[in-house]
Image (cartoon, rainbow, N blue to C red):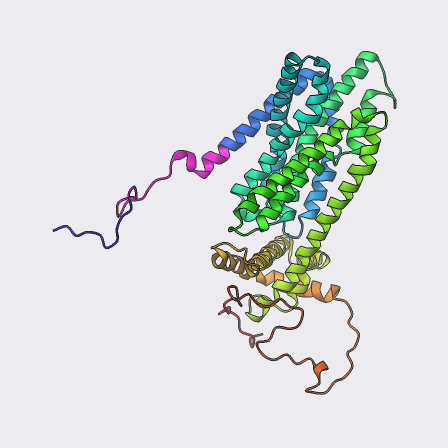
Amino acid sequence: MATSPPYPIPPGAPAPGELRRAHWWQRRAIRVAALVTLLALSGLVILALVREQTGTEGFLVGLGLAVVPVPLLVGAFRWLDRVAPGPWRNLLFSFSWGACAAALIAIVANSFAIRWIATTTADPSSADTLGATVIAPIVEESAKAAAVLLVFLFRRRDFTGIVDGVVIAGVTATGFAFTENILYLGNAFVTDQLSRESGLASVTAATFFVRVVMSPFAHPLFTVLTGIGFGIAALSSDRQQLRRVLLPLAGLLLAMGMHALWNGSAVFGQYGFFTVYAVFMLPSFGLLTWLAIWTRQRELRTIRAELPVYVGAGWLTAPEPYALGSMRARALARDYASYTWGKAAARAVGEYEAYATSLALLRHRGRSGRAGADFVVRERELLDELWERREPSRPALAYAARATAPVMPPMPYAGYGHPGYGFVPYGHVPYGQPQPHPAYGYPAHNPAYNPYRS
């Protein structure tokens, strides 16, 4: 006699003992292969289009000149991301998307829009102006924002705040500007070849000065606004759905507006370009640079504030929160490990620093009520990763903490019971340390930790 299962089976669910197989398009390898194929095909098409417009010689000259600012810009964004470095695959995807997919979308859409405006309006001469000030900002910023959106949706664990948004958006825009500069510089070289001009007065030199020397940060500056919108959305809780949608859209609209102002500066008169550059672009660049650096320093302060709780539970040693909250101490710890035990140990220390940073930021989100349902699981994963790398990391960070700690002036003597004696009752949190959130209290004690074992 057949017995019914003890629990009801929902409609469409697999029968007991059966496993539902994922569809072929849901497999990670298939999705990665499709993405790589898409970017490769976009790159080949872009290569053919640019070479068709500039010729082989113009393409090579444009390529050689356009690559000049790329290492500086990518290095700057990578420096900004040093506190909690994201994986290289995210940066590689972002740059490839900007240089290939976004550039292809922009070239095709802008060309189509300009031709359509020229054939449907009474004033065909206005097509280029409308295309530069209206169509190009909308198309190009939307195409670049798609990379930030994809990382935000599919690499959510790596996208935790404003710095991540700034880095992903900036690297994407750097790739886009790289391809665009090849086209502009290659066309300028062809113009010089046809007019037989050379020297400082040449079109190539002027284009290089404006796009590479004066404004290499232009495209990254626009798209970083979109990245900041996504970064603030990443800091929002899951309950704030409207905010998570509106903030990225607001950042995208600001990016489009700034892009339109920059492209339209040429129609403001003889000195319109220099006016917009001096009055608007440079102050905006300085403000966003300050914001990015301030956010980076805030992450370091968060590390020092959140990690001491793991010292009491036995997961970290006392000097580590200070050392992990100092970029100088972190670099010194890696150098010490490399000199003492070799490059493998230095890599382990670097990984230890990255995991500890992720742990501190995770706990900060939890204490603020913005952690996901997998908070406990993720916290334990990070703690296990730290425990596996403790052998070279603990002495290296202890050395770095001693070498970089400020010299404290001697405290005046105060007897026992005096407020200045320094005694902290058990269970109390020292002044200046964050109070534990009721839902995210002290972590479980590490059973492998024995304070009396040397």
Give the residues in magenta. Answer: 11-33
Residue furthest to the front: 122
Horizontal side of 3 relative to 99 (left or right) equals left
Q: Is residue 170 magenta?
A: no
Q: Observer-nearest residue: 349 or 184? A: 184
Horizontal side of 295 relative to 42 (left or right) equals right
Magenta span main SS: loop
Horizontal side of 191 relative to 99 (left or right) equals right
Residue 52 position in % (x across, y down) = 66, 16
Residue 333 position in % (x across, y down) = 68, 59
Using the image, determine if residue 341 lies above or below residue 203.
below
Residue 113 position in % (x across, y down) = 63, 19
The answer to whether residue 374 shows anywhere in this view is yes
Residue furthest to the left: 1
Q: Observer-nearest residue: 439 or 3? A: 439
Residue at image location 74% in from the left, 28% down from the top: 263
Residue at image location 64% in from the left, 42% down from the top: 227
Tell me the quarter of the image containing the C terminus. bottom right
Label count reads 0
Using the image, determine if residue 412 lies above or below residue 262.
below
Instruction: Locate residue 146: give its quadrant.
Output: top right
Q: Observer-nearest residue: 203 or 386? A: 203
Instruction: Locate residue 119: give its quadrant.
Output: top right
Q: Is residue 31 magenta?
A: yes
The answer to whether residue 334 shows anywhere in this view is no
